[in-house]
Image: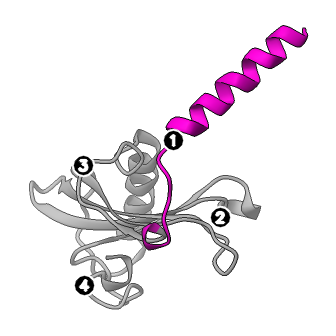
Amino acid sequence: MLRSTGLAAAAFVAALATAPTAHAADIIGIYDGTDTICGHKNVRTTIQKRFRYQVTHVPNLPDVEIVDFYGAGLTRYQPAAADSPIERRYCRATARLSDGRDRNIWYVIEYGQGFASIGDNVEFCLSGFDRWKVYNGSCRVLR
């Protein structure tokens, strides 16, 4: 038992030694590239369901659905900190709609902000579909 505990501790220390170090300038990063979380199936499914609800309940929006996502990438990362305890991952992708058009979509994944603080929350804005300017027109808030 003592030997296995020692091996586990040694593996943990080795993992810490090889982990990249964070510097003060890295607190909020600007990224451009593919990201496994931004393109995760659960995130895409959540956005597709909420978008479908939006176009059926907001007057004068076209009756379309999101049929595909591509080019999902991380644009900004904000780790949890003492003055901002919510970890956020800002993403951008291109959404293909059922009418054949491609539109830019921006979204944020907020960790621990799901219903009753259980799970995560996803807020999104599809270019041309923010009729009530919730995200300040042209989806500026989520960019």
Labels 2 and 1: the sequence-earlier one:
1
Residue at left offset 18%, top offset 52%:
98
Circle 4 residues within 10 Å: few <14, some 14–19, many ≥20: some
Give SS at disc 1.
loop
x 50%, y 72%: residue:
24
Residue at the spot x=63%, y=77% of the render?
Answer: 84
Q: Nearer the viewer, mark 2 or mark 1?
A: 1
**Residue 32 falls within the magenta-colored stretch:** no
Q: Earlier in the sequence, mark 1 or mark 4?
A: 1
Q: Residue most toward the left?
A: 100
Q: Which mark is residue 138?
A: 4
**Residues under labels 2 and 1: Cα distance?**
27 Å
Please report contact status of discs 4 and 3: CB closer than 8 Å, yes or no. Answer: no
Instruction: Write down the residue under mark 2.
Output: 113
Mark 1 or 4: the one toward you: 1
Q: Earlier in the sequence, mark 4 or mark 2?
A: 2
